[in-house]
Image (cartoon, rainbow, N blue to C red):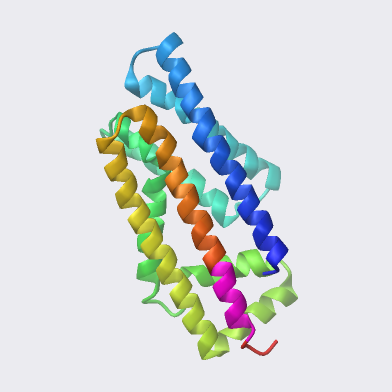
């Protein structure tokens, strides 16, 4: 992927991080003060913004790209957890329910012919262009490309499983308002750092693969 493309994705994620670390906190504080002292009610109001934003992004792009699917499935997972008795703290780790599961899926996919991040890479690099997809898939024949896809998948798996464990620890040990700020920040920083590493590593690998 071109370097300016990676910068665009990182800037977009950084903007989402800023929004998701401030607006939910403001909604939480206002709900606690003016609507209800209930922790659950305040947290439900805090999750309204990221939920509506995810739906808006999905409708605007008219397609379910992998990133949007991750966010929406995280919401669905948290709703299911609440339905089966999850408490207020469950909402603090809402996004990480699915990213944790995604991390595990990444590690499990290493046992299959092609790991998950191969398909994510094809989506971001080739898009819907048939010729670009053909070129991307043809590189699988090279051992260095296969190793790269598997290493990238393993790294994403370890990062997201680790992020989930750390977020759970934060949610159950810190005050709610602090955890509400740190939780999305942790996810955003982990994601951005891993994306930057992925792009740099992939660029080095592609330099040694015939076009």
Q: Position of residue 82 (x, y in %)?
A: 32, 34
The residue positioned 37% from the left and 47% from the top of the image is: 97
The answer to whether one can see residue 51 in this image is: no
Residue in front for this viewpoint, 7 or 141: 7
Q: Is residue 1 left or right of residue 117?
A: right
| Residue 204 part of the magenta segment | yes
Question: Which residue reaches farthest top?
Answer: 34
Question: 125 above or below 16?
Answer: below
In this rendering, the answer to whether 132 lies above or below 46 is below
Q: Residue at x 35, y 13 (%)?
A: 37
Q: Is residue 115 left or right of residue 123?
A: left
**Residue 107 painted magenta:** no
Query: Quadrant location of the N terminus?
Result: bottom right
Q: Nearer the viewer, residue 203 or 154?
A: 203
Instruction: Tell me if residue 54 comes above or below residue 9 in the rendering.
Output: above
Q: Nearer the viewer, residue 42 or 174?
A: 174
The image quadrant where one finds the C terminus is: bottom right
Residue 92 image point, x, y percent: 37, 36
Question: Where on the picture, by quarter, is residue 135?
Answer: bottom right
Count of numbered circles on the image: 0
At 47% from the left and 16% from the top, the residue drawn is 30
Q: Residue at x 68, y 55 (%)?
A: 8
- Residue range highlighted in magenta: 198-207
Q: Position of residue 145 (x, y in %)?
A: 54, 83
Task: Note whether residue 21 is visible.
Answer: yes
| Up-down relation of residue 53 to residue 69 (above or below) | above
Instruction: Examine the residues drawn in magenta and state their main secondary structure.
Output: helix
Residue 163 lies left or right of residue 146; in this view the side is left
133 left or right, relative to 185: right
Give the x, y percent position of residue 71: 50, 46
């Amino acid at each position: 992927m071109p370097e300016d493309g990676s910068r665009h994705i990182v800037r977009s994620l950084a903007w989402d991080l800023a929004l998701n670390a401030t607006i939910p906190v403001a909604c939480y504080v206002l709900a606690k003060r003016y609507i209800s002292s209930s922790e659950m009610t305040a947290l439900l109001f805090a999750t309204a913004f990221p939920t509506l934003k995810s739906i808006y992004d999905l409708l605007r792009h008219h397609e379910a790209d992998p990133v949007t699917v991750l966010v929406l499935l995280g919401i669905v997972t948290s709703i299911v957890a609440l339905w089966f008795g999850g408490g207020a703290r469950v909402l603090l780790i809402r996004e990480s329910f699915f990213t944790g599961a995604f991390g595990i899926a990444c590690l499990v996919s290493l046992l299959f012919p092609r790991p998950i991040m191969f398909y994510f890479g094809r989506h971001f690099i080739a898009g819907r262009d048939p010729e670009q997809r053909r070129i991307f898939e043809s590189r699988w024949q090279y051992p260095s490309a296969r190793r790269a896809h598997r290493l990238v998948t393993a790294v994403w798996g370890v990062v997201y499983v680790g992020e989930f464990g750390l977020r759970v620890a934060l949610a159950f040990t810190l005050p709610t308002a602090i955890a509400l700020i740190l939780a999305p920040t942790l996810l955003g920083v982990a994601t951005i750092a891993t994306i930057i590493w992925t792009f740099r590593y992939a660029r080095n690998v592609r330099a040694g693969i015939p076009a």
